[in-house]
Amino acid sequence: MSNLDNIVEFKSSPELRAKLFQYSTLKTLKKGEVLIAEHSYIRSIPIIISGSLQVLRSDEEGKEILMYYIKGGESCIMSFLGGLHNEKSMLKAVAEETTEILFLPIERVRELIREYPQWLEYIFKLYHKRFEELLELVNAIAFKKVDERLLDLLHKKQKLMGSNVLEVTHEQLAHELATARVVISRLLKQLEDKGIVELGRNKIILLK
């Protein structure tokens, strides 16, 4: 059973769910593979069947910051907006783990909007969730210290992966939080001294 089976809008319209699978192409991305690159045109909308993606934004110097995650049953609202208006992507999406994805062509998105109010409701719910997450990001950058943001990120990854053993490097965490690797390494050592994490080679074990 895919994560789409749990979505209210698709439960109320089996025909819509069937159309999604009929019109879409199913592909699998390995961890670290780029789904959408910045400044590329969007020709299809990704709908996550299983696994997860991280969505990042970079500045002119190439420094990246994590915007939000997309998990099973969800899609990227920025892909909807960019694709429907034929605009280039402002974000990059990368597989956080092995991820199965349905790719729905943009022309089918418009068709489903006309035919199924449940599909439009699904899009609105995604928009609302992403907006709330971006507000949380702004709040974190403005009011939280880096150590708080780091611990929040580790807990998000724990929830996303369903495990307290996180296969992630200090460099990756630094990219996602838009800070330096040495800062992350220092803060992780402090968390280890407090008994909150245990550090290993390219992995972090959350103890609390």
Image (cartoon, rainbow, N blue to C red):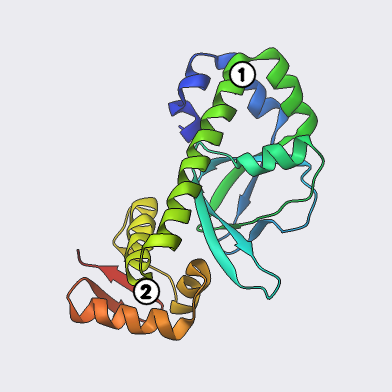
Residue at the left extreme?
195
**Which residue is disc 1 drawn over?**
16
Identify the element where label 1 is drawn: helix
Report whether residue 2 is seen: no
Instruction: Look at label 1 and name its amino acid.
Output: Leu
- Regarding residue 151, the answer to whether it shows in the image is yes
Residue 86, picture quadrant:
top right
Callout 1 touching callout 2 (CB < 8 Å): no
Quarter of the figure that contains the C terminus: bottom left
178 shown above or below 38? below
Q: Which x, y percent locates residue 167?
A: 41, 69
75 vs 136: above or below: above
- Which residue is labeled 2 in the image? 203
**Within-10-Å neighbours for mark 1: few <14, some 14–19, many 20+:** some
Count of numbered badges drawn on the protein: 2
Image-quadrant location for residue 197: bottom left
172 relative to 117, above or below: below
Kind of residue at disc 2 = Lys
Above or below for 26 versus 158: above
Residue 58 placement (x, y as % from top left): 64, 65
Question: Camera-side residue: 109 or 13?
Answer: 109
Look at 34% across and 52% down and name the residue there: 159
